[in-house]
Amino acid sequence: MISLKTYNKQQLEELINSTVFNDLPFYPITKHRAISHIKNSNATDSDSLLILAFEDDNLAGYIGVLPDNIIHENQNIHLGWLSTLFVHPDFRGKKIAQKLLSKACDEYNGNIMITEFTPEAENMYVKSQLFVYQKTLYGKSYHYLSNLQKILPSKNKTWSKYKLCLKAFDSTLNSLIKLINKTSATNKESFKITYQLDHETASFIDKNKIGNCFNRNRKEIEWIVDNPWILTDNTTINYQFSAYEKRFEYIFIKIYEGDNLNTVLLLSIRDNNAKLHFVFGKNDPITASKVLHQYTKQNNISNLISFDQKINEQLDRKKILLKKDRQRKFLMHKNLQKTLGENFIFDISAGDGDAIFT
């Protein structure tokens, strides 16, 4: 018999600090990710953050939810982003994933959104007939350095036999690219890098909130930066969604016009790859693209991902090793769409939802 158990902030904190948690056959959440959920300022005390499925007394699967708010017609509409869904192979074929999904939707009265899903999960969501697609975010992946040793084997395992050759090719080509970047003239834009939400940046974000339907504020950005989900120490744990990188950090690029700060870019750096999540302030795409291009080359960033179309239009004009199209799909529960009404415009930034943590 399948039973489900929900965990709010207090219950989740008690779980991760219990002996029961350490004795579980596999982890339904890591401690650092749980703490991030607990510190989420958008989570209420009664919100279900984690739902576990048991067959008899055996942990069979789980689903995680990240609470958030949509601002529509000057009202906060509370919702949850599905952030994890997993059923252990020993318990598959028993419709446990469907039961977890249904329970999560019930807990949030249908106010559920989903993004960054696998094709298999997408198929299940569509088959449930509970969700409708929203406007897709279209972006670009700009490859500044060669990384064939990782890309090709991931596409076709046959390339694994040639990994040493690919590594040598990458090294030779990238040495040449770095030499060109070092010796070539670049536009010297006025910008500074900070790795923390300093007073100047915090004040600027407070005054220049993004005017979309999530309208991120300083408090939310501080929570995100202080509570990453990616591990930077190679701790081996039995958790399906664990990720380890030698380097993971958020950076703020502050762009100035004279002595005045007019734009702040929030990026995450994972290993040698950068993602642009938010643009606060003026967002002059010509200047922003020059700064991103300059920063990427100076810091030997291998890959830059951006979903800002105006910035991408400018980056497309620059000489970059490889440019690839990307897209991010979104699903919204029909109940949430009904609540928001026909006049609601789905306007979203790349950093909205749980994608900013990965």
Image: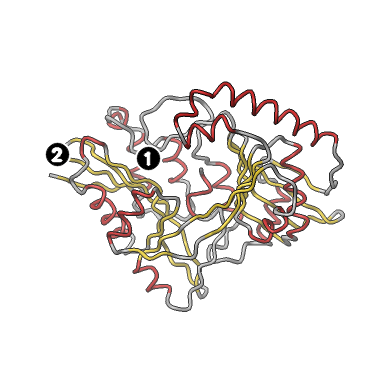
Q: Which residue is mark 2?
A: 56
Picture quarter containing residue 123? bottom left
How many numbered marks does the figure carry? 2
Of all residues shown, which one is farthest toward the left?
A: 1
Few, some or many residues within 10 Å of mark 1 (<14, 14–19, 20+): some
Q: Which residue is mark 1?
A: 13
Q: Is residue 351 left or right of residue 121?
A: right
Q: Residue at x 42, y 63 (%)?
A: 78
Q: Against 350, is 54 above or below?
A: above
What percent of the width, then of the height, locates residue 163?
Answer: 54, 24
Q: Residue at x 41, y 50 (%)?
A: 117
Q: Quadrant of the N terminus?
A: top left
Picture quarter containing residue 286? bottom right
Q: Is residue 252 left or right of residue 220?
A: right
Q: Against 221, is 174 above or below?
A: above
User: The residue under label 1 is which amino acid type?
Assistant: Glu
Picture quarter containing residue 206? bottom right
Decide which of tag 1 and tag 2 comes sooner along the chain. 1
Between 172 and 14, which is closer to the camera in this rendering?
172
Q: Residue at x 20, y 41 (%)?
A: 54
Between 163 and 130, which is closer to the camera in this rendering?
163
Comparing marks 1 and 2, which lies closer to the viewer?
A: 2
Q: Is residue 32 left or right of residue 310?
A: left
Mark 1 touching mark 2, by CB under 8 A? no
Between 279 and 310, which is closer to the camera in this rendering?
310
Q: Secondary structure at mark 2?
A: loop
Q: In this figure, which colouring scheme has been used for the structure?
A: secondary structure
What percent of the width, then of the height, locates residue 71?
Answer: 51, 68
Of all residues shown, which one is farthest toward the top?
A: 164
The mark found on residue 240 in the picture is none
What percent of the width, then of the height, locates residue 217?
Answer: 59, 58
User: The residue under label 2 is which amino acid type?
Assistant: Asp
